[in-house]
């Protein structure tokens, strides 16, 4: 027999049946006045994240004095030369140093332009304006003349249109846009699959201040980091989305990310192999084989090999020692001594990955190093304590690589080049480690990060980003011990638009980015191209998952 609804006195929530069960009251709110549902799609996430990321990176582009980035004067010269058809610099008597012929106001951005380097109390006001150098073609020295020209061809074209300071700023902004594109793909992947949404919260930890700083400069190291992050996230998406075969679109994005990341520096292909092996270890062999057999994956693999092969050939034949410039420190050690020395420097490298800015002469506040170390420790502990065995295996490979890769690379070459490793060189591995470890921690319900946890991570990371930005700007504006009040009042060196303009850009970008991260982490499910988008408040049906 049916149940007769019995009205409950004083109740505004619906009807109660004779058996005591409550039936929901129909929503009689007119459609015209109902609150619109917030629809979150991966494409929308990508677009909004791209905006926030670009604002943050562009703030660093404008707030950093010309040539203040690590080796940036050499990279600017290489970029300007590449778009002018000079792909390889002329050799000199100094190992690793080559020369190009360029207009002085575009290529001659070292020398007096770096008058403040290694002098923390000297402001950037001592540097002459590039326009004052004139347009006469001169011989310019660089230590990256043999690097593969792909990155430089992409970012160097503004120097063909404008000269002086706007030439370098234009290159920086193009580089910032490219790097923001790849970082936005990480959040695109996180929004595309429920099992990956935990990546959103850990993305805030992976993007240390150094990531955004390098992302806003002319330096292929920044693009290597960002493209490796994209390859990691997209690789996890392709392997763990069992609802459908890998789409051609996703595989194209993954192939581009891998090809770009592997073409940046001489060590990039090795780093990519390590990262991709770690990602593949997060799924059973049967799942990996089934994915590799699909047509879209085979086509993407072939295209990636074709794209990477010229970079590998270039590196082996032209740039074998590219970037390996002998250290000014006279110490030269054997393999065992160098391995020990490098291993004991792990803590210093860690600080470099969080943020040692400029030409290794500008530091973040100690609180930033401590806070970020705690964040990294949490994700490592979460992966080891809560992660499932298979997902944890990939994280362990990258944890070991963060420590051992510098040892393996520097120990055999220290007798020739000395100690030349910097923490930023290991950032591609660290960023990939945080993403894979965060996924491993989230593979168990005990380690998943919801909206509240993501909000805490985002808030703490945003504070660290702002503190680092202010510390670096202060160093160049009024000196590392100068008055912050004088800096904020417009005294000393100032970025284009002033400190308040670039500071506002940074804050707006962080707010937009934080909103995207929290939205992804709070959503019960992320939409896929084959399913309608859901708002964060909608319940999610169960999804098939790869056995682990």
Image (tube, rainbow, N blue to C red):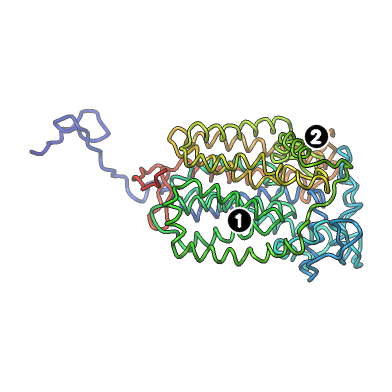
Q: Nearer the viewer, residue 379 or 216?
A: 379
Give the tally of numbered discs: 2
Position in image of residue 240 (x %, y %): 45, 50
Q: Are marks 2 and 1 in contact (CB under 8 Å)?
A: no
Q: Is residue 528 above or below residue 433?
A: below
In the rendered image of this protein, does residue 261 appear above or below residue 394? below
Q: Secondary structure at mark 2?
A: helix
- Tell me if residue 509 comes above or below residue 148 in the rendering: above
- Which residue is at a point 78% across and 54% down the rendered structure image? 323
Circle 1: is it few (<14), some (14-19), or many (20+) Cα within 10 Å?
A: many
Lower position in the chain sequence, tag 2 or tag 1: 1
Which label sits on residue 181? 1
Find residue 490 and report its horizontal and vertical position in percent.
Answer: 81, 42
Q: Is residue 351 left or right of residue 111?
A: left
Q: In this orientation, which residue lies closer to the viewer: 525 or 352?
A: 352
Along the viewing direction, whichever of 369 and 99 lies nearer the viewer: 99
Q: Split into 4 quadrants, where in the image is the N terminus? A: top left
Q: Which residue lies under the disc numbered 2?
A: 485
Image coordinates of residue 278 in percent, x first then y, are 55, 47
Q: Quadrant of the C terminus?
A: top left
Quick one: which residue is furthest to the bottom in this view? 85
The CA distance from mark 2 to mark 1 is 36 Å
User: Which disc, if any, is residue 143?
Assistant: none
């Amino acid at each position: 027999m049916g149940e007769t609804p019995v009205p409950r006195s004083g109740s505004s929530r619906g009807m109660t049946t004779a058996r005591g069960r409550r039936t929901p009251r129909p929503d009689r709110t007119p459609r015209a006045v109902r609150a619109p549902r917030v629809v979150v799609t991966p494409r929308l996430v990508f677009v909004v994240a791209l905006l926030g990321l670009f604002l943050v990176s562009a703030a660093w582009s404008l707030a950093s004095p010309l040539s203040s980035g690590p080796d940036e004067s050499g990279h600017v010269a290489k970029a300007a030369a590449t778009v002018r058809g000079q792909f390889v610099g002329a050799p000199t008597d100094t190992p690793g140093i080559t020369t190009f012929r360029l207009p002085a106001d575009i290529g001659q951005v070292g020398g007096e332009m770096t008058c403040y380097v290694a002098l923390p109390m000297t402001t950037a006001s001592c540097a002459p304006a590039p326009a004052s150098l004139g347009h006469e073609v001169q011989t310019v020295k660089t230590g990256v003349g043999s690097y593969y020209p792909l990155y430089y061809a992409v970012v160097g074209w503004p120097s063909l249109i404008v000269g002086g300071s706007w030439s370098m700023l234009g290159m920086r902004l193009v580089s910032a846009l490219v790097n923001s594109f790849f970082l936005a793909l990480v959040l695109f992947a996180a929004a595309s699959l429920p099992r990956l949404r935990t990546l959103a919260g850990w993305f805030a930890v992976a993007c240390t201040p150094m990531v955004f700083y390098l992302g806003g400069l002319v330096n292929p190291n920044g693009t290597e980091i960002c493209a490796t992050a994209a390859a990691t996230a997209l690789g996890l998406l392709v392997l763990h989305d069992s609802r459908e075969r890998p789409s051609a679109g996703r595989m194209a994005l993954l192939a581009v990310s891998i090809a770009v990341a592997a073409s940046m520096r001489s060590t990039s292909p090795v780093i990519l192999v390590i990262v991709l092996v770690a990602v593949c270890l997060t799924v059973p062999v049967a799942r990996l084989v089934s994915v590799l057999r699909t047509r879209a994956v085979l086509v993407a693999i072939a295209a990636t090999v074709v794209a990477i092969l010229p970079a590998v050939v270039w590196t082996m034949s032209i740039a074998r020692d590219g970037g390996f410039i002998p250290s000014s420190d006279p110490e030269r050690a054997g393999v065992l001594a160098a391995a020990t020395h490098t291993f004991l420097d792990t803590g210093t490298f860690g600080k470099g990955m969080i943020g040692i800015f400029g030409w290794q002469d500008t530091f973040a506040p100690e609180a930033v190093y401590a806070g970020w170390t705690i964040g990294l420790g949490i994700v490592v502990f979460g992966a080891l304590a809560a992660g499932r065995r298979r997902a944890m295996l990939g994280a362990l490979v990258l944890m070991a690589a963060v420590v051992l890769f510098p040892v393996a690379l520097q120990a055999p070459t220290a007798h020739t080049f000395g100690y030349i490793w910097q923490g930023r060189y290991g950032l591609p591995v660290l960023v990939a480690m945080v993403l894979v470890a965060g996924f491993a921690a989230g593979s168990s319900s005990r380690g998943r990060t919801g909206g509240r946890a993501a909000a805490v991570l985002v808030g703490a990371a945003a504070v660290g980003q702002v503190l680092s930005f202010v510390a670096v700007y202060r160093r160049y504006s009024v000196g590392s011990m100068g008055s912050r009040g004088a800096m904020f009042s417009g005294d000393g060196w100032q970025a284009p638009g002033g400190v308040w303009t670039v500071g506002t850009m940074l804050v707006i970008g962080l707010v937009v980015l934080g909103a995207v991260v929290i939205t992804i982490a709070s959503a019960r499910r992320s939409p896929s191209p084959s399913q309608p988008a859901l708002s964060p408040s909608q319940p999610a049906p169960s999804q098939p998952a790869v056995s682990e």
